[in-house]
Image (spheres, grey):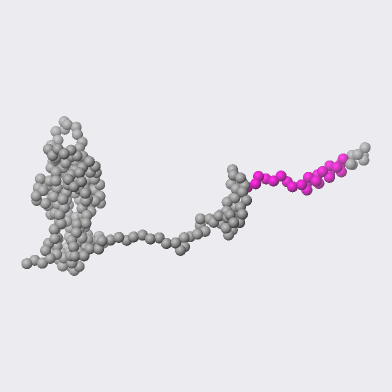
């Protein structure tokens, strides 16, 4: 009996030694490999996809391994160079929001909606949404500039309909605004700053345009002469007509402003 017991113990010892020398069960392998760069690869295990061995030739260069050195691109600088001429470069749009008939309101913005109106007839086509009024005078590059005038006239407030009996008279009031050059400095060549003239542009007086700029000979420097009508106090509009409050209506209206630039003669006889 003792001999049989010893044999059983020896057999169990041999089985234990055999198990300790066998390879352990392998843990779940990494299921994907990411190569971040090809000089010092770093590997990440991402669950949910099959493990794929990556050969040396299959390594992927990371996006930050190239800096774009040696690449080129091109763009444009575009300009029209003026010399010896006087030009009207920009004229402003005016939007006064909603007003009652026979009332006055301040400027709301310079963005206008002329959908439904006819370009050149009931809608102006040259206005900008920045409130910019700009002239460039390149007729002389000395301080003895010849001078010019800029006038404006306005038609009645029209609706999209072609019925002219529905037109409303209006008056546009423009404030005096400083005249600046391209560096936002006053265009005056003396200690007296120059500005636009306060103007009253009446739709009933289209044959008598209002003067907005009037620069005398030798009073200003060559180049850009500009003013911005883009604040509530820079412009007001008085709408004509009557309002009895009994008829409900809301009609979009538009009036066309005509700007006229005139050169003063370079030589006065």
Outermost residue, left side: 269
Q: What stretch is highlighted in magenta?
A: 8-30
Q: Position of residue 35 (x, y in %)?
A: 57, 53
Which image quadrant is residue 39 in? bottom right
Q: Where is residue 234 in the image (x, y as percent from the top left)?
A: 20, 50
Outermost residue, front side: 57
Identify which residue, 201 or 90, lies in the foreground: 90
Where's the C terminus, which quadrant?
A: bottom left
26 part of magenta stretch: yes
Identify which residue, 184 or 72, lies in the foreground: 72
Determine whether, in the image, residue 100 is placed left or right of residue 60. left
Q: Where is residue 21 in the image (x, y as percent from the top left)?
A: 78, 48
Determine whether, in the image, residue 254 is placed left or right of residue 78. left
83 part of magenta stretch: no
Residue 186, can we see it? no
Query: What's the residue at 20%, 37% (across, down)?
Result: 251
Instruction: Tell how many labels.
Output: 0
Query: What's the residue at 24%, 45% (across, down)?
Result: 112
Which image quadrant is residue 253 in? top left
Where's the N terminus, which quadrant?
A: top right
Residue 198 sits above or below residue 242 on the image: below
Q: Position of residue 217 (x, y in %)?
A: 13, 64
Outermost residue, top side: 246
Magenta span: chief secondary structure: helix
Query: What's the residue at 60%, 48% (across, down)?
Result: 32
Query: What's the residue at 16%, 42% (across, down)?
Result: 157
Residue 74, can we see it? yes
């Amino acid at each position: 009996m003792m001999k049989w017991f010893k044999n059983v113990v020896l057999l169990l010892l041999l089985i234990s030694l055999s198990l300790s020398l066998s390879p352990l069960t392998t843990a779940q392998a990494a299921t994907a490999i990411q190569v971040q760069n090809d000089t010092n690869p770093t590997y990440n295990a991402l669950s949910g996809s099959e493990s794929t061995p990556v050969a040396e030739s299959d390594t992927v260069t990371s996006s930050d391994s190239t800096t774009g050195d040696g690449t080129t691109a091109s763009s444009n600088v575009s300009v029209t160079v003026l010399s010896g001429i006087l030009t009207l470069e920009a004229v402003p749009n005016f939007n006064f929001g909603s007003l009652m008939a026979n009332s006055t309101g301040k400027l709301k913005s310079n963005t206008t909606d002329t959908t439904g109106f006819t370009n050149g007839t009931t809608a102006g086509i040259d206005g900008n949404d920045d409130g910019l009024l700009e002239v460039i005078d390149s007729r002389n590059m000395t301080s003895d500039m010849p001078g010019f005038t800029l006038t404006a006239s306005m038609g009645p407030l029209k609706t999209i309909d072609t019925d002219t009996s529905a037109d409303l008279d209006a008056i546009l009031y423009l404030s005096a605004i400083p005249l600046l050059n391209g560096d936002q400095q006053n265009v005056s060549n003396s200690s007296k700053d120059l500005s636009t003239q306060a103007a009253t542009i009446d739709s009933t007086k289209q044959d008598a345009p209002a003067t907005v700029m009037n620069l005398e000979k030798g009073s200003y420097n060559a180049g850009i002469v500009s003013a911005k009508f883009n604040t509530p106090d820079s412009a007001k509009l008085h709408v004509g007509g009557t309002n009895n409050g009994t008829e409900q209506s809301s009609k979009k209206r538009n009036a066309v402003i005509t700007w006229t630039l005139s050169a003063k003669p370079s030589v006065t006889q």
